[in-house]
Image (tube, rainbow, N blue to C red):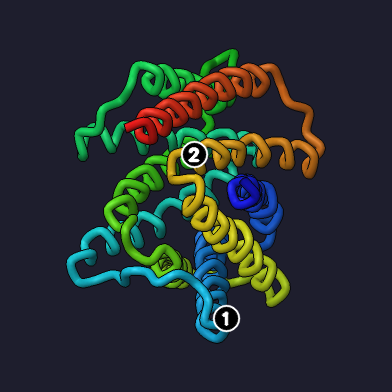
Amino acid sequence: MTTNKAAVFWAVLAAGLYALNSPLSKLLLEDVPPTMMAALLYLGAGAGLALVRLVQRGLHTGASEQPLTRRDLPYTLGMVVLDIAAPIFLMVGLTMTTAANASLLNNFEIVATSLIALLVFKERISPRLWGAIALVTLASAVLSIEDETSFSFSAGSLFVLLACVCWGLENNCTRMLSAKDPLEIVVIKGFGSGAGSLAIALARGERPAGAWYTVCALLLGFVAYGLSIFFYIYAQRYLGAARTSTYYALSPFIGAGLSLLIFRQAPGPLFLGALLIMGAGTSLAVLDTEKSVGTTSSG
């Protein structure tokens, strides 16, 4: 029981750490260009978890895991390329929309992941999950409206949704590597995607604004991407992937709340309406996951 409670704590901690991403990235984007910001976030995650691996080896701790092999190369490359594109789209979106909107819109990743799993891997989608997809999509459309009088759509929100589509594709690539060493996967994600984004940033003429902002972005990447995934992995070992994801679904709502506090923004009627719809859709997705866990465990 103690182990299970600890695992729930790790899962909620992972959600809370990732929730820091949108509001703190929004602050740093005032001084760091968006593509450079995406590069620093992933490089921070890769460097931080590489250090964790060195500490584990020094202390002779950590479970024995299967390493990636040449047969995993297509999915590994797909994962890295998509993880280059997704955070760049997110950072660009954050420069044009509020951090609270971006945090809630991250739930669209549920829709993208599910539909890609259906179309590519022929996974079945339950009626409850179809309901969740419909509600999350509706809420995302509401959050994307820039001017309700003319029904013009926010370019920033569309970039965030594009990032979610990339992460949905990436989730399906990563699922093909799920039996392999998760820490190795995250380190490859960090350094591979970070280096790719850095090359694009430099080619665009972007430069870090200064040592202080660079260090802050690297630390944010280590905490919001690296440590978040690290604790998520440990939670999965005791709770399983499905139950862990139900706790991780708290992250967009925590992020939205933090954003409203940090930027002292009063939520408008569209945001509040979308929040209620998004909450209902996420609840359906969580209930569907819990039902799947119950079905699996009873078999």
Q: What element carries label 2?
A: helix
Q: In this view, does 23 lie to the left or right of 75?
A: right
Label count reads 2
Residue 225 point in image, percent of width and height = 55, 58
Residue 240 to residue 117: above or below: below
Q: Is mark 1 on a helix, strand or loop?
A: helix
Give residue 124's quadrant in the image. top left
- Spatial CA distance of label 1 from label 2 is 29 Å
The answer to whether any part of residue 199 appears in the image is no
Q: Which residue, given by chain and number where applicable, does mark 1 sit on?
A: 55
Determine whether label 1 and label 2 are within 8 Å by CB. Answer: no
Asked whether 212 or 188 is in front, the reply is: 188
Residue 179 point in image, percent of width and height = 31, 58
Numbered badge on residue 258: none
Q: How crowded is mark 2: few (under 14 residues within 10 Å), some or many (20 or more)?
A: many
> Which three-letter amino acid code belongs to the residue tagged 1?
Val
Q: Which residue is drawn at 47% across and 72% down?
A: 202
Q: Which residue, given by chain and number where applicable, does mark 2 sit on?
A: 243
The answer to whether any part of residue 132 appears in the image is yes
Q: Is residue 134 left or right of residue 274?
A: left
Asked whether 87 or 179 is in front, the reply is: 179
Q: Which residue is drawn at 56% across and 75% down?
A: 52
Q: Is residue 2 left or right of residue 290?
A: right
> Which three-letter amino acid code belongs to the residue tagged 2?
Arg
Residue 299 point in image, percent of width and height = 31, 32
Residue 98 to residue 28: above or below: above
For marks 1 and 2 on the same chain, the one whose residue lies earlier in the sequence = 1
Kindly give the residue lying farthest to the top in the view shown: 149
